[in-house]
Image (cartoon, grey):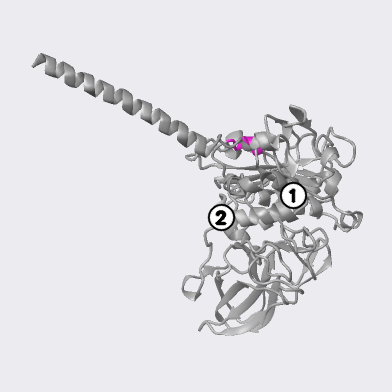
Amino acid sequence: MHSRFRRTGALVGTGAVLFGALAVVAGNQADAQQGPSPAPLDTLLGEQLQGKAALGKLQPRLAELAERNGIAEQQLQRILATDKTSWLDKDGKLFYAEPVATAKQRSATAKSPQFATKAVAAATGPAFELHSKAGSNRVIYLDFDGHTITGTAWNNGKPSTVNVTPYDTDGNTSNWSTTEQNVVRDVWARVAEDYAPFDVDVTTQAPPAAAITRSGSSDQQYGTRVLIDPTTWYQSGCGCGGVAYVGVYDNTSQHSYYQPALVFTKGVGTGAKNIAEAASHEAGHNLGLSHDGTASVGYYTGHGAWAPIMGVGYSKAISQWSKGEYSGANNKEDDFTVVGQNGLALRADEHGNGTSDATALTLGTAVNGVYASDSDVDTFRIDLSAGTFTFAANAAASGADLDIRLQLLNSAGTVVATADPAAGQSNSGTPTGLSASINRQVTAGRYYLRVENVGYGNPLNTGYSTYGSRGGYSVRVTAG
């Protein structure tokens, strides 16, 4: 019995050795068939490359590149092959280096509204305490106060530490003049309007680092820094107006590595209109958006008074989010959908849609609202004595995106008057016809105001649809 057990054990051991040997042979054969593991993308690239050159090197790895950047393979192919401002860094991450504004585009900027009353010694006071939606878990920080850039993708091949100086237009960096503060405030107002439909706080007040940087998937408070950069450390090399990585806003790893987005005043000028257009555009890249162009131009400059934010809107007073409805559009992505997939949800509806849940108004007092969804209707109610009244719905005072149709309804809910002026611009920074008002004599009773978004003209070549016509407004009823 003992000998039989020993024999069986020997056979089992021999079988194990034989099986192991066969496994090694099979593994070697599989390795021989598969060949060596593909080289890492950073080894293949070696350095950052312009899109078309990068595509030439990495065409067989396009699917891997697309996954790395969270972009459909076909779309990434188009971007790299046709957009001269597209780049891949050595790790295969997509970023854009924007062209500078032309001399004509820089000179066309309207003067910023007066806001500040005195110069301040530091980035404090009203111009640096602005919030579009305080308390939101998402943030877009417009940084005019200078910043130290270190340990980021922008330092790769550049100085390891860069001290960006504050925004300055008068050569005196020891204080902020009223003119400089007015620009800060106007840029904020314009960018805040572009992002008004989203649940995000556009702010000029420096948030704590944790409010921008995302530490992981469980961290639900994060955002991006858009740095207004007057220096030449990067701009002199790229000759560009701004740079930003694509689709990194809600990254759960290496979030801070792809920060900040940069706007170079040496590329776009020091005026509020151009800085704001560039800032919204660069933040849009962080949120996953690509350029709106045509087959012949990388950036669509618009038509009439309109341009897409992800094109170039320096010379147009009305710039909106787009889904490529203009003639010859090469990018049909739905901006609102893409932004939603990259960390920003739409705001919740603030006002009732009908007469049964209308928001109450008091004579002479303005009530603010945000039109966030293309299917929204906001309704307000007011009880009036007999007399003549002005019913007004005003779009944002600076950089309005929302084009308003205002309707006055009687107590039965029947429309008795409508206002929808033609849209246009008095200059590149000032739209016209987006607000609406009705002056009417009424009998005593309850009345309703209905606020809706509208388009203007033909989105193919003369105007825009309701799609991007969203933003902030105020409603007020006054006597007389």
Name the quadrant of the N terminus. top left
Q: Earlier in the sequence, mark 1 or mark 2?
A: 1
* Labels 1 and 2 touching (C-beta < 8 A): no
* Mark in the foreground, 1 or 2: 1
x and y percentages locating residue 433 in the rendered image: 75, 72
Q: Position of residue 431 (x, y in %)?
A: 78, 66
Q: Residue at x 65, y 73 (%)?
A: 454
Q: Nearer the viewer, residue 422 or 8?
A: 8
Q: Which residue is mark 2?
A: 340
Q: Secondary structure at mark 2?
A: helix
Nearer to me, 362 or 314: 314
Residue at coordinates 59% horizontally, 35% vertically from top-left?
254
Quarter in which the C terminus is drawn: bottom right
Mark 1 — residue? 52
The answer to whether residue 290 shows anywhere in this view is no
Residue 187 is a magenta residue? no
- Give the class, few, some or many, for how many residues have Cα within 10 Å of label 1's Cα (few <14, many ≥20): many
Question: What's the amino acid at mark 2?
Answer: Gly
Quarter of the image for residue 107 reads bottom right
216 and 108: which is toward the camera: 216
- Name the chief secondary structure element in magenta: helix
